[in-house]
Amino acid sequence: MGIAGAGFRHQAVIERDHAACATLRANAGRGVAPLADWPLIEADVRTFDYAALPGSPDLLAGGPPCQPFSLGGKHAGPRDSRDLFPEAVRAVRELQPRAFLFENVRGLLRQSFARYFAYILLQLTYPTFGQRADESWLDHLGRLERYHTAGSHPDLGYHVVFRSLNAADYGVPQKRERVILVGLRRDLGLDWAFPAPTHALDALLWSQWVRGTYWERHEIARQDRPPIPATLQSRVARLRASLFPPPLQPWRTVRDALADLPDPLSAAAQALANHHFVPGARSYPGHTGSLLDEPAKTLKAGDHGVPGGENTLASPDGRVRYFTVRESARLQTFPDAYCFTGSWTESMRQLGNAVPVTLAQVLATSLHARLAPPEQC
């Protein structure tokens, strides 16, 4: 949705999960933009024939499953059957897009995966320099390193960059750190850099504890405002001593995102799709919920999110409750018109696996501007 919002028109949307496809079809059937004209294909990318698509696309985008590299997973990396980075490389090799955009968890950058991440980068840089049938990935890495340092690379190639981004720095009301990999085809002669952050923690703290405009906007009386968190007191003191406000916009908080939604236990909530109270939430070590006046913690899809209890709101009075599906969609910056089908657990799994729409649109807009012909810029 973020990529479509940036001006790209989809040639194919490939998803193997039937429940996720059901959600996409339901929204397309309701005319939710931009899904209505998406060519959705329910298929496993491992068996997909890219020759069926018309020519080389401007942009190939995807999120290889994060479970092999997640901090909460089994940490098996390339030994995990869910590692689909080889399929990402195949898609680049066969489609030869002008650019690609891939997303994964920050755990991909851990030291234990350093060699495999270097392998991923070199494969994406030289996608036609394939692995031999009798060759391990480590041996293939060695050949790629020799090829890379040889100096002459006449085949298809990409300039590849990566960065760990926090979605909160781009206006998403959630502290969600993800690794983004971007490649531009070498023959295009284009340069590109990651968009600069637009939002910052210091700007939020300034609005809360220096000017007080955050509380005034939300009509929170002075006596009802929480104390400055102990971990932020020195930072706030430094800001109070400054003559000028931070130049960026404030991080968006849970309160910012959910302020106009009714309490999920109220009668008004019953009229809203996906906004229903789910009982049974509790707090325990490592899973203490998201605070109202900060960006939410990362919404999760696995055992530590659903049903593990990570996706909860910690109210100022100490109570903890699960985020509703609608609230979680707000935290992932989905429009309210977008609805989720199936159970709460299934809907939350889809949300936990999603890329925030706003973050995707920021990245895709920057790429769209760079790839557009000069007369369209």
Image (cartoon, rainbow, N blue to C red):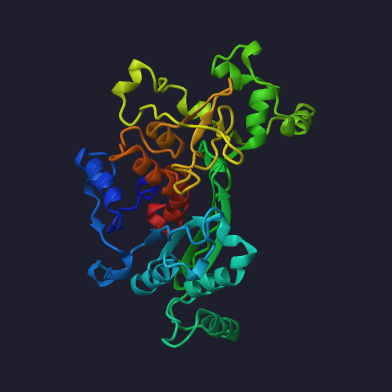
Depth check: 77 or 320 in front? 320
Q: Where on the picture, by quarter, is residue 264?
A: top left
Q: Can the viewer see residue 75?
A: yes
Q: Residue at x 52, y 66 (%)?
A: 76
Q: Is residue 110 above or below residue 271?
A: below
Q: How many marks?
A: 0
Depth check: 256 or 296 in front? 296
Q: Where on the picture, by quarter, is residue 230?
A: top right
Q: Can the viewer see residue 247?
A: no
Q: Residue at x 41, y 23 (%)?
A: 261
Residue 311, horizontal then vertical, whole percent:
48, 37
Residue 185, horizontal then vertical, whole percent:
45, 69
Q: Is residue 215 above or below residue 293?
A: above
Q: Residue at x 48, y 43 (%)?
A: 305
Q: Is residue 48 left or right of residue 226?
A: left
Q: Is residue 278 left or right of residue 172?
A: left
Residue 188, horizontal then vertical, whole percent:
45, 69
Residue 52, horizontal then vertical, whole percent:
23, 69
Q: Residue furthest bottom?
A: 134
Q: Residue at x 39, y 38 (%)?
A: 334
Q: Is residue 171 above or below residue 48?
A: above
